[in-house]
C-alpha cells in the first residue's frame, strides 16, 4: 500500500505502554494506516488525536465489527485471551491453545489437533490482533481490549464453552458452605471467603487435586462432567433432590449452583479436565480448497466467454420482453410470483435463475419502476445506451453491479421474520455482508491451480474458517440465533449462490475460475493460503475499477464474435451458429419464434410469426431479400411458399370502426366469414357486397379473425393500412440503486495519509509542550493576508501535501474577521479540513470564506 505520510518522526512514547493510546503513539505511520484500513469505521469522523482514536477503537460497535472480520484462528486466540487472566503472559496464552498435558476426560487427542502448527501460527495471529488494536501490551503483559473481553466471554458463557471462574461462579455461596467444601476436600479452614476461594482454586487447578478426586469418584460422576466439560458449562438439575453424582460434585465444589435449578462447571475445573486447552479443536491452518476436476485453462476461458455472451443475451431478452409487456409493481413493492413464473417461461430458465437476472438488471440501472399511477417495471434509458456499447463494456457493467450488490437474489422465496415471502425486486433482500462474502468466495476459487474446479464443500469450509462470524446468522428472516445450523447460514447461502452466479456471468467455466475471474478476484496478489484473507482484502472503488478493466481486457479476445448469417433449413427452422448481430437478431425475433437455446439458437417460422412481420410493415419481397442476404444457402422452397402464402392472404380483409367493419374486394371470402358458425359471437352482417359490419370493437375483431386463421389488417378512417408495431416502454431517467453495506467503504491511500497526518497533528497539539502561537503583530503583515481564490486554493493543497502550516484570514457567517494558523490535511469539495493551532482542535472551513493565505514556517 502506497500512502503519503506526514513529515517528522512519531512522538516518543513510554517503553511500557500504560494504555492503548500509549501503544498507538509508539506505532509508525504505516501501522496506524494499517489499523485504519482494517477498521474503516474509526475514520467516521477522523479522530482529533490518538486518545480519541483509542477510545473509539474500544467502543462496542467498533469492536463487534473488528471481531467479526477475524479469521478462525485469530478469533480462537482472542477467545482464549478473553478467558485468561488480565494481563496474560504469552506463555500462558500458548498453554491455553496447546494444552498442558493429556485431558482428564475424553480422548487424549482430537482429530486435527496440531500443537506444532498452533505454536508456529500464534505470533502471526497475535500480530493481527495487535494491528487491529484488539490486543495491546508487551508479550509478558498481553491485554485484550475490555469491550472485546465482554463480547467474547459474556456472563452466560464463552464461545470456548468455559464457564465463569470459581470465585465468580460461587459469589452467592455462604461462608459456611465454602468451609464445608474445604472440609470435604481435606483442606484447612480459612478466616475469610476470599482465602477460601484462593485455596479451592489452587487445589482444583493444581496438578494433583482433581486427578485424585476423579480416581475416587463414584459411578456417574465422569459421565456428568463429560456432558459439561466442552460446553455449554451450565446444566439443569433438581437442587432440592439432586442425583448422587451431582451431590458428590456439589459437595466438592466441582459444580456450583448458578441459579434456580441450574449448576455451572467452574472455569478452572473445566480447564484442568480439558488438559488446559481453551478450545477442543484449534484451527491454526485454513482448510485446503481441494480440486474436484482439472481442465485445460484455455478450455475454461472459452467456456466462460460463451457463458458471458449468454449472460448478455439473457439480460437483453429479459428487457426486450418487459419493454413490450411491462409487469406491474406489487402494492407492497416487488414483482409478483405469477409475473416471475411468466418471465421464467419466456427466458426458459428456472425461477431462481430468473430472479437473479432480474435483480442484476435492476442493480445495473437497466431496469426500474416507471413511476406511473399504475406502476410497472420497464427498461430505463440507460438500457438503450448499454445496448450500443461493445460487449466487454456491457459485461463489465453487469459484473460491477453484481460485485457491489448488497441484494441477495437467492433469498427470493424465503420468508422474513414475520413469515412473509420475500419477492424479487422487493424489500428485505439487502444483506450488508454480501459483497464481502461474494469476493471472498471468488478468492477461494483462485487458490487451486489455474483450470482447477474445486470441491464446493471445501470452498464453503474455507469461508467458514476465514470469517466464522461474518454472515453466521440465519439465511432467511430478520431474527438471529446463537447457534445457527452451519448449512443454513447467510454465509453459506451467499457462497453457494456466488458459485452459480459466477458460472452464469462467465467468471468461471466448468466450475474453474477463468482468467478474467482470476484477475478480478486477486488484483494481482498471489493466491497464498498462508496470507490472512481478511486484513487489507477490502478494495477501494479505484482498485475495483482497475480490476474490472483488466478482466474485460482478458475476456474480449475470447468472446464469440457476432455472426451475420443463419442456417435456413427445409423444416421451416433457422439455426444461429452463434450470437447474432443486433439488427439481424431484432428482425429475426419478429419473423420467427425461438424454439430452443443453447450453443446454437433454433428459430422456427410459422404463419403467425410471418404475419407478425407483415403487420409491422414488412413486405413479402423484403422478407425474401432479408433471408437471402443472411443465409449462405438458397432460401428453402417451403419457407418461400410460407411467406408468399401468408402475404397473399395478408391484408385482404380490412377492419375499421363502425363499431367495426370488415372490407374485402373478394366477395366470396366475406360470404365465407358470414357463413362460418365460429363468427356468430361477432354478429356480422352484410352492409354491401364488399363490406361486413360487426358489433365488437376493431381490436377484438382483429384478434378473433386471426384466431380463426384469417389474416386481416387494420385501416384508418381514410382507408390507409395501420401498422401494429408493439410499443416499447421506457422509464424516466433513473439512477441505479445504491447498495446498503454494513459499514463504511475501504479508505484509499490518500484518505489514509490525510487521516494519519491529522491524528498525529492533533495528538502533538495535545501531548507536546505548548509554545505560544505567533501573535498577529509578529506575522509578516499586521493585517490578515489577502490572496486571490486560485492562489489560496493552491497554497492549501500544497500545505496539505507537504504537511506545512499556513496563516489565513477568515470571515465567519456573521461577517466577523479573524486570523487562524492551521495545518491543512484535506482540501476537497470547497472545504479545507485541518488542525487549527489557534483553538487546538480539528476544524473545517469553507474556502470561499478564507480571504487569503500565507506560508508560515514551523519553528
Image (cartoon, rainbow, N blue to C red):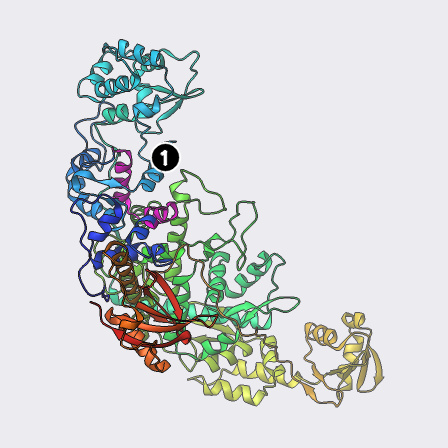
Q: Nearer the viewer, residue 39 or 54?
A: 54
The answer to whether residue 479 is above or below residue 321 is above
Is 317 magenta? The answer is no
Q: Position of residue 373 (x, y in %)?
A: 66, 67
Q: Would residue 786 be found to the left or right of residue 77 on screen?
A: right
Q: Residue at x 53, y 47 (%)?
A: 415
Predominant secondary structure in magenta? helix
Q: According to the image, label 1 marks what residue? A: 154
Residue placed most toward the observer, 358 or 252: 252
Quadrant position of the C terminus in the picture: bottom left
User: Residue 246 is drawn in which quadrant?
Assistant: top left
Residue for point 27% across, 9% down: 183
The location of residue 124, given as percent across then percent down, is 19, 47
Residue 578 seen in the current view: no
Looking at the rendering, the stretch of residues picked out in magenta corresponds to 56-85
**Side (left or right) of 244 relative to 636:** left
Q: Is residue 68 magenta?
A: yes
Quadrant that contains the N terminus: bottom left
Amino acid at each position: 500500500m502506497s500512502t503519503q505520510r506526514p513529515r517528522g518522526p512519531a512522538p516518543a512514547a513510554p517503553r511500557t505502554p500504560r494504555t492503548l493510546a500509549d501503544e498507538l503513539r509508539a506505532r509508525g505511520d504505516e501501522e496506524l494506516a494499517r489499523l485504519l484500513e482494517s477498521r474503516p469505521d474509526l475514520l467516521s469522523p477522523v479522530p482529533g488525536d490518538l486518545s480519541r482514536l483509542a477510545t473509539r477503537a474500544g467502543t462496542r460497535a467498533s469492536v463487534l465489527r473488528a471481531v467479526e472480520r477475524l479469521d478462525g484462528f485469530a478469533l480462537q486466540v482472542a477467545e482464549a485471551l478473553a478467558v485468561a487472566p488480565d494481563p496474560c503472559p504469552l506463555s500462558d496464552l500458548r498453554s491455553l491453545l496447546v494444552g498442558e498435558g493429556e485431558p482428564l476426560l475424553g480422548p487424549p487427542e482430537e482429530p486435527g489437533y496440531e500443537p506444532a502448527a498452533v505454536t508456529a501460527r500464534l505470533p502471526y495471529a497475535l500480530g493481527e490482533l495487535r494491528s487491529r488494536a484488539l490486543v495491546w501490551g508487551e508479550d509478558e503483559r498481553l491485554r485484550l481490549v475490555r469491550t472485546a473481553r465482554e463480547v467474547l466471554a459474556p456472563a452466560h458463557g464463552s464461545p470456548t464453552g468455559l464457564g465463569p471462574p470459581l470465585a465468580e461462579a460461587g459469589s452467592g455461596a455462604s461462608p459456611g458452605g465454602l468451609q464445608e467444601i474445604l472440609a470435604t476436600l481435606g483442606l484447612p479452614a480459612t478466616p475469610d471467603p476470599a482465602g477460601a476461594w484462593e485455596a479451592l482454586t489452587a487445589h482444583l487447578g493444581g496438578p494433583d487435586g482433581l486427578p485424585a478426586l476423579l480416581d475416587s469418584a463414584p459411578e456417574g460422576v465422569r459421565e456428568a462432567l463429560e456432558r459439561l466439560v466442552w460446553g455449554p458449562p451450565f446444566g439443569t438439575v433438581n437442587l432440592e433432590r439432586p442425583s448422587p453424582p451431582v451431590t458428590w460434585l456439589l459437595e466438592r465444589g466441582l459444580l456450583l449452583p448458578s441459579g434456580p435449578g441450574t449448576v455451572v462447571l467452574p472455569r478452572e475445573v473445566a480447564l484442568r479436565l480439558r488438559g488446559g486447552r481453551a478450545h477442543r479443536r484449534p484451527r491454526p491452518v485454513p482448510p485446503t480448497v481441494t480440486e474436484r476436476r482439472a481442465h485445460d485453462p484455455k478450455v475454461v476461458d472459452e467456456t466462460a466467454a460463451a457463458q458471458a455472451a449468454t449472460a448478455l443475451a439473457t439480460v437483453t431478452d429479459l428487457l426486450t420482453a418487459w419493454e413490450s409487456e411491462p409487469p406491474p409493481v406489487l402494492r407492497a413493492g416487488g414483482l409478483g410470483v405469477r409475473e416471475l413464473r411468466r418471465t421464467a417461461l419466456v427466458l426458459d430458465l428456472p425461477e431462481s435463475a430468473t430472479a437473479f437476472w432480474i435483480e442484476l438488471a435492476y442493480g445495473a440501472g437497466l431496469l426500474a419502476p416507471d413511476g406511473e399511477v399504475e406502476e410497472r417495471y420497464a427498461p430505463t434509458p440507460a438500457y438503450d445506451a448499454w445496448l450500443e456499447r461493445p460487449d466487454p463494456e456491457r459485461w463489465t457493467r453487469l459484473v460491477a453491479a453484481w460485485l457491489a450488490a448488497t441484494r441477495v437474489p437467492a433469498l427470493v422465496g424465503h420468508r422474513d421474520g414475520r413469515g412473509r415471502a420475500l419477492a424479487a425486486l422487493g424489500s428485505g433482500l439487502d444483506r450488508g455482508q454480501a459483497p464481502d462474502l461474494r469476493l471472498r468466495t471468488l478468492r477461494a476459487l483462485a487458490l487451486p491451480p489455474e483450470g482447477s474446479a474445486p470441491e464446493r464443500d471445501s470452498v464453503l469450509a474455507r469461508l467458514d474458517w476465514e470469517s466464522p462470524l461474518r454472515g453466521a446468522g440465519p439465511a432467511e428472516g430478520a431474527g438471529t440465533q446463537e447457534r445457527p445450523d452451519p448449512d443454513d447460514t447467510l454465509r453459506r447461502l451467499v457462497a453457494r449462490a456466488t458459485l452459480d452466479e459466477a458460472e452464469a456471468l462467465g467468471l468461471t467455466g466448468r466450475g474453474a475460475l477463468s482468467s478474467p475471474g482470476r484477475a478480478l478476484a486477486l488484483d494481482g496478489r498471489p493466491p497464498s493460503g498462508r496470507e490472512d484473507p481478511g486484513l487489507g482484502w477490502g478494495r477501494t472503488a479505484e482498485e475495483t475499477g482497475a480490476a474490472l478493466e483488466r478482466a474485460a481486457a482478458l475476456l474480449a479476445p475470447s468472446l464469440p464474435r457476432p455472426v451475420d448469417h443463419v442456417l435456413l433449413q427445409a423444416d421451416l427452422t433457422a439455426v444461429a451458429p452463434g450470437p447474432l448481430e443486433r439488427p439481424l437478431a431484432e428482425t429475426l425475433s419478429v419473423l420467427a419464434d425461438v424454439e430452443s437455446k443453447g450453443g446454437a439458437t433454433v428459430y422456427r417460422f410459422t404463419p403467425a410469426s410471418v404475419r407478425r412481420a407483415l403487420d409491422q410493415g414488412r413486405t413479402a419481397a423484403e422478407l425474401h431479400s432479408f433471408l437471402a442476404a443472411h443465409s449462405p444457402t438458397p432460401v428453402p422452397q417451403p419457407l418461400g411458399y410460407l411467406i408468399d402464402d401468408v402475404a397473399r392472404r395478408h391484408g385482404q380483409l380490412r377492419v375499421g370502426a363502425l363499431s367495426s367493419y370488415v372490407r374485402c374486394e373478394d366477395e366470396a371470402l366475406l360470404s365465407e366469414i358470414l357463413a362460418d358458425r365460429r363468427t356468430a359471437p361477432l354478429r356480422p352482417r352484410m352492409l354491401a357486397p364488399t363490406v361486413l359490419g360487426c358489433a365488437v370493437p376493431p381490436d377484438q375483431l382483429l384478434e378473433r379473425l386471426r384466431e380463426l386463421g384469417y389474416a386481416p389488417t387494420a385501416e384508418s378512417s381514410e382507408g390507409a393500412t395501420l401498422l401494429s408495431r408493439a410499443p416499447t416502454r421506457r422509464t424516466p431517467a433513473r439512477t441505479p440503486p445504491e447498495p446498503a453495506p454494513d459499514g463504511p467503504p475501504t479508505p484509499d491511500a490518500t484518505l489514509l495519509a490525510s487521516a494519519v497526518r491529522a491524528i498525529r497533528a492533533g495528538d502533538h497539539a495535545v501531548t507536546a509542550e505548548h509554545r505560544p502561537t505567533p501573535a498577529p503583530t509578529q506575522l509578516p503583515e499586521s493585517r490578515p493576508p489577502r490572496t486571490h481564490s486560485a492562489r489560496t486554493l493552491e497554497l492549501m493543497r500544497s500545505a496539505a501535501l507537504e504537511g506545512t502550516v499556513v496563516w489565513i484570514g477568515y470571515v465567519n457567517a456573521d461577517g466577523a474577521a479573524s486570523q487562524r494558523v492551521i495545518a491543512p490535511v484535506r482540501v476537497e469539495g470547497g472545504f479545507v479540513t485541518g488542525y487549527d493551532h489557534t483553538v487546538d482542535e480539528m476544524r473545517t472551513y469553507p474556502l470561499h470564506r478564507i480571504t487569503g493565505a500565507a506560508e508560515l514556517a514551523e519553528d
